[in-house]
Image (tube, helix red, strand yellow):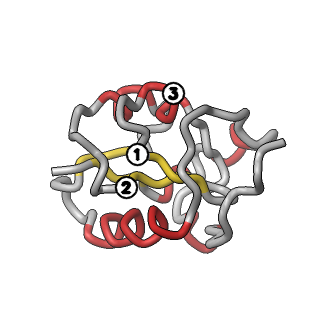
Amino acid sequence: MTYVVTEKCIKCKYMDCVEVCPVDCFHEGENMVVIDPQRCIDCGVCEMECPINAIIPETAADTEQWVEHNQKYATLWPNVTTASLPPKDADQWKNTPNKMEHFSPKPASPKK
């Protein structure tokens, strides 16, 4: 079992999860993060840290698309080991349903 990041993360990208991950399994896109299932050790620490419950076990109902999504983008986006600030409008997006239409497949911009 591994954990996956779901669409709740899109446009919020709170990165509390990144800071607590003991194996650095997060990868950062322009407007969300994903978990590398090959690196995840199933500790569950990230799930508890996410302030909007965007991280769930892959065994939860209806996660198939998120397992695939995390697998795909973990190979395309850069690994991230330190949190950055969430977008300025993250709080406005945190309770928005069906955010997939706002997903960006672009990797995160390089940190300065």
Task: Please tell me which residue is depicted at 60% across the width and 32% down the height of the picture.
Answer: 82
Nearer to me, 10 or 94: 10
Q: Are marks 1 and 2 in contact (CB under 8 Å)?
A: yes
- Cα–Cα gap, marks 1 and 2: 5 Å
* Earlier sequence position, callout 1 versus callout 2: 1
**In the current view of this chain or complex, which residue is farthest to the right?**
112
- Cα–Cα gap, marks 1 and 3: 11 Å
Q: Which residue is mark 2?
A: 36
Q: Which mark is residue 19?
A: 3
Q: Which type of secondary structure does the marked residue at label 3 adopt?
A: helix
Percent of width and height locating residue 104: 66, 69
Nearer to me, 92 or 56: 56
* Earlier sequence position, callout 1 versus callout 3: 3
Name the quarter where the C terminus is drawn.
Answer: top right
Nearer to me, 23 or 30: 23
Percent of width and height locating residue 2: 23, 50
Q: Are marks 1 and 3 in contact (CB under 8 Å)?
A: no
